[in-house]
Image: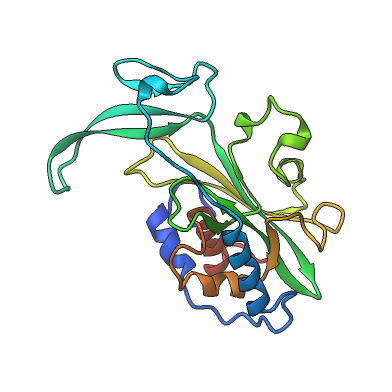
């Protein structure tokens, strides 16, 4: 069912990502100690400074009686909704939801290194993370938010993923994100095979090659693997995609 669009929800995908696997990582490019040392260093060099400010002080955003958004249509809107449901703790309520303005892309670039499939993870800093940085897919963004910028300013490997032909896309499906906080939030999930030219053995700062087993082992720890990476990992653990 993970091969079908919008069938398995985010919570189930996260649980599947935690399935124990018997993947042999003896030929991993980096040992577990090296991988964890790199991740610890990435966390140490990042710091997020977040503070509350009044809506009237937010530049570039407009609001009306029911929503808050940008005139250029990028990023997301905050919308007011009224909900009725007969199978919840209360029958009705109102709340704000975040509505993305486009379909996101979450993709792992992978390649075989020493005959073993490796995933290119990104130590990604995001607002709201408890520890500032978690491991995410190679690409995690909404492409429409970046089209106005030159190629050098776009996320690394985004163009590699978007330009990949059918022969290099090993998995593709659209999955919805968590519905209690987001409205109409969908991401296009992919596994894209690459070579040395597209994804070098020595990746840019903030990126590292890991095996499926190494990434799977980190799901036993809180705040190590982000939700988008867990969705892609669930596809591997459930056999929806094979990289070997």
Q: Which residue corresponds to the image point at 73% horizontal and 35% vertical from the top-left? A: 153
User: Relative to 147, does residue 203 appear above or below in the rendering?
Assistant: below
Report the side of 65 relative to 168 (left or right): left
User: Relative to 62, does residue 147 appear above or below in the rendering?
Assistant: below
Outermost residue on the left side: it is 90
- The residue nearer to you, when weighing 226 against 115, is 226
Occupied quadrant, residue 82? top left
- The residue nearer to you, when weighing 55 against 239, is 55
The location of residue 28, given as percent across then percent down, is 72, 77
Q: How many marks?
A: 0
Occupied quadrant, residue 110? bottom right
Q: Quadrant of the C terminus?
A: bottom right
Report the side of 161 relative to 106 (left or right): right
Q: Which residue corresponds to the image point at 52% horizontal and 30% vertical from the top-left? A: 75
The location of residue 101, given as percent across then percent down, is 50, 29
User: Relative to 208, does residue 7 appear above or below in the rendering?
Assistant: above
Q: Which residue corresponds to the image point at 81% horizontal and 62% vertical from the top-left? A: 202
The location of residue 145, given as percent across then percent down, is 60, 30
Occupied quadrant, residue 176? top left
- In this figure, which colouring scheme has been used for the structure? rainbow
- The residue nearer to you, when weighing 229 against 131, is 131
Q: Which residue corresponds to the image point at 41% horizontal and 39% vertical from the top-left? A: 51
The location of residue 115, given as percent across then percent down, is 79, 75
């Amino acid at each position: 069912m993970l091969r079908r669009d919008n069938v398995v929800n985010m919570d189930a995908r996260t649980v599947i990502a935690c399935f124990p696997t018997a993947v042999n990582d003896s030929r991993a490019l980096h040992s577990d100690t090296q991988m964890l040392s790199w991740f610890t260093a990435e966390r140490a060099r990042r710091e997020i400074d977040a503070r509350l400010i009044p809506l009237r002080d937010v530049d570039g955003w407009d609001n009306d009686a029911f929503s808050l958004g940008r005139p250029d249509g990028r990023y997301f809107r905050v919308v007011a909704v009224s909900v009725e449901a007969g199978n919840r703790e209360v029958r009705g309520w109102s709340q704000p939801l975040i509505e993305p303005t486009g379909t996101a892309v979450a993709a792992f670039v992978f390649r075989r290194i020493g005959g073993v499939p490796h995933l290119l993870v990104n130590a990604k800093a995001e607002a709201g993370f408890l520890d500032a940085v978690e491991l995410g897919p190679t690409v995690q963004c909404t492409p429409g938010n970046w089209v106005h910028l030159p190629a050098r300013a776009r996320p690394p490997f985004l163009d590699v993923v978007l330009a990949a032909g059918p022969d290099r896309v090993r998995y593709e499906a659209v999955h919805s994100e968590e519905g209690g906080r987001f409205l109409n939030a969908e991401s296009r999930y992919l596994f894209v095979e690459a070579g040395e030219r597209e994804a070098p053995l020595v990746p840019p700062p903030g990126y590292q090659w890991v095996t499926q087993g190494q990434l799977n082992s980190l799901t036993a720890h809180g705040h190590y693997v982000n939700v988008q990476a867990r969705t892609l990992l669930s596809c591997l653990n459930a056999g929806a995609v094979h990289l070997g």
